[in-house]
Amino acid sequence: MKIAVTAAKLDAPSVAVSRAMDAMASANEMPSLELGIQRYPEVRVDGQPVAIKLKRGLALLALLSEFGRKVARAQLIDLLWPDATAEIGRARLRRLAHEVNQVLGMNAVAGDHDSLWLSGGAASLPSDVERVRRAARQLVADSIHPQSRESVELLLAAGAHQILDGFDLGVETFDAWLSRRRAEQQQLVARALQRAAEQLLAVGQAVLAEEVASRLTTLEPLADSGHALLLAALAQLGDLAAVEGRYFAFAELLRSELGVRPSPTFELSYAEARRAAAADAPVLTERPPSGAPRILFADTSDGAVAYLELGSGPQTLVILFGLWSHVEVSWEEPTIRSILLRLAQRYRVVLMDRRGTGVSERLVLDQSVPAGVEDLDAVRRTLGVDRLWLFGNSAGGLIAIEYAATHPDAVEGLVLYATSAKGCWSPDFPWAPTAEQFDTWAARLQSGWGGATSLEKFAPSQASDPVAQEWWARLLRQAMSRNSLPTLLREASRMDVRHRLAQLRFPTLVLQREGDRVVRPEIPRYLAQHIPGARLTMLPGDDHNLWAGDVGSVLDRVEAFIASSAERHSRP
């Protein structure tokens, strides 16, 4: 990261830095700071290496660079000295910032009473890691064009997916933060490589597509998508032997690592690649079926939020799924796709991923209800619409409730399907899971990572279906990282919008299946009792997931409710 910082000489800069500063002063130029954070941190002032011996000093620079904004002193203290009292922590942070500036010979770290930040031009210039992120987002959002080659090459670099490789502080909070950051950076790079390979195959650039797909398989060796794209690239090159070799190598990897066979989806990719290579004919890129809509993005304070848009009806219906969300993987599931296409015949339909999940910005940890509200409003503003119908499913329903209460002028009405008003058990809300149950669930999901964990609770009608199991396992893997699970579930357990229910003055439909194994039937009744004028409909069935079981009866109720509400509103 090359950072130009407005510098002020300190009393005792290092000799090397003093000389550099004197030379620069004679030329009426300011010193610049270069900070490399893809690997072990390297610090240079005007191109000359500067040794910062304090590991916490390097960690501080890395933290400020990664956050890219003002960071609360309390947050930095918690990451660097979690066991210190507030007073001791503030003193240590103040001393550390001073020592870093003294070694650098410049006021690179600035602050006020509450926060610290990189001063001068540091905040406006991208780091090496941030350049990778921008390239990745560009590849995910846009079509391949000649200027994309630079972004592709940036992501192909050996360290593109890394952050502070080889560096640790021996402090639990910092190292946990760094572990999450590394996992999310790798996932973002992998997602961009997948998108680049798909588009390169679509325009017949098989050689580069093979290189990109090969790189993707090294980052995600157990994921179908990269290996399927690699088979497609080899098929376009007409290399049948390589297609066969790659298929059997991946099958053996799955057998030895997970004890499973390749999925039916991957088998189809192999069969198509084999036919195309044998015929020396081009193989189509692995695109989502049925003409998937383009992924769009809305900007928030913490990064981009992804969404799909279909239809052009007079009313806009935004769908918020629960904890597990990935707009592309969702579109690939035939029932979800049919749901969206049916609704798109009547409405302008939007399906979105909240921050931290799916295709949205993954390098943030804020999974709170207010963060979800900000994401939703960013999408609304990007769409350019004044009022929305909200379809909140499971945890998405709590965000819909909060949004409707805090943005009443932007909401037409609510559909709350299999949702709750509070995440965790309390004496006055005894139907939600306890904290211990959340912890047990998190441990189970992590230990079973890569498999169709909890499908028997979320969709019992699909629990024995191999195709449904394979898709559910893929959704879990793609929706989040294994390391982000505890944060996601912790924030879910903290959700509580009961105080908002009485504020809702919109047409509201509460829907749920009677045998739902995730949300107990007392909860929709609670919602209907506490939301003024809400209509409650309990349907037969045991599935929590919207797309399992009798989907048609759910959509019938939704469409009829919106139509009747619109008719009442239009009456004089």
Image (cartoon, rainbow, N blue to C red):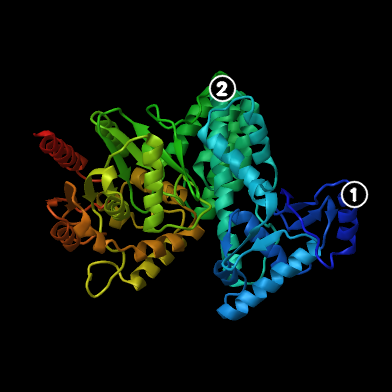
Which residue sits at x=57%, y=56%?
181
Residue plotted at (23% across, 53% down): 418
Task: Identify the residue at the far left of this view.
Answer: 572
* Quadrant of the image occupied by residue 84: bottom right
Report the front residue among 557 and 45. Answer: 45
Secondary structure of residue under mark 2? loop
Mark 2 is surrounded, within 10 Å at the Cα level, by few (under 14), some (14 to 19) or many (20 or more) other residues, namely: few
Which element type, helix, strand or loop, lies under badge 1?
helix
Side of 272 where 129 appears, left or right: right
User: Which of these two is toward me, 297 or 189?
Assistant: 297
Residue 3, given in percent of the width and then of the height, sits at 72, 49
Q: Which residue is mark 2?
A: 203
Residue 89 place in picture, x, y as percent: 61, 76
Quadrant assignment, res 531: bottom left
Residue 98 appears left or right of 395: right
The tag earlier along the polypeptide, 1 or 2, is 1
Q: Which numbered tag is attached to residue 26?
A: 1
Q: Is residue 455 visible?
A: yes
What residue is rendered at 67% in x and 64% in y? Answer: 60
Mark 1 or mark 2: which is in front?
Answer: 1
Q: Position of residue 260 (x, y in %)?
A: 46, 50
Crowdedness near tag 1: few (<14), some (14–19) or many (≥20) residues, C-alpha within 10 Å: few
* Left-right relation of 266 to 441: right
**Which residue type carries mark 1?**
Ser
Do the CB atoms of the residues marked 1 and 2 lie less than 8 Å apart?
Answer: no
Q: Can residue 471 be seen at all in this image of the molecule?
A: no
Q: Identity of the amino acid at label 2? A: Val
| Residue 378 location (% of width, % of height) | 41, 43
Depth check, front residue: 473 or 243 = 473
Numbered circles on residues, count: 2
Q: Examine the rendered structure and indicate whether residue 424 appears above or below residue 153.
A: below
C-alpha distance separating marks 1 and 2: 54 Å
